[in-house]
Image (cartoon, rainbow, N blue to C red):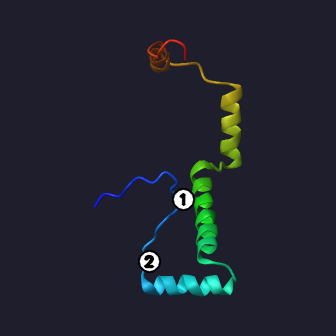
Amino acid sequence: MPRTIVENNNRLALRVRPNDKATLMRAVALEHTDMTNFILRHALDAARKVIEQAEHLALSERDSLRVLDALENPPVPNAKLLAAARHLPKGL
């Protein structure tokens, strides 16, 4: 059955196994919080870590120096790069 579109969709529904829910409820009680705050806080922490890992690039000192050198002394464009540049739309 199709679900109706809700304009204010601030809810997130989860299906969990009973033993997983019991584990969550125990942790919630130990932290003296509620289920929404507990799940949201920990899910957001995990989401931020995933995003950070995906967007962050760690370079060794050697690689960092190579990047800086390439920025300061860019190589001469080869034929393929020049051909690709000629095929770019005007205004870019």
Residue at the spot 49% in from the left edge and 82% down from the top edge: 21
* Vertical side of 16 occupied by 1: above or below: above
Residue 19 percent across, percent down from the top left: 46, 87
Nearest the viewer among 80 and 33 is 33
Q: In what element is the residue under mark 1? A: loop
* Vertical side of 87 occupied by 1: above or below: below
Nearest the viewer among 82 and 92 is 92
Residue at the spot 55% in from the left edge and 19% down from the top edge: 77
Q: Which residue is mark 2?
A: 16
Quadrant showing the N terminus: bottom left
Residue 66 lies left or right of residue 4; in this view the side is right
Residue 34 percent across, percent down from the top left: 63, 78
- Amino acid at circle 1: Asn
Residue at the spot 56% in from the left edge and 52% down from the top edge: 54
Residue 44 percent across, percent down from the top left: 61, 63
- Amino acid at circle 2: Val
Which label number is shown at residue 10? 1
Q: In what element is the residue under mark 2? A: loop
Residue 11 lies left or right of residue 49; in this view the side is left
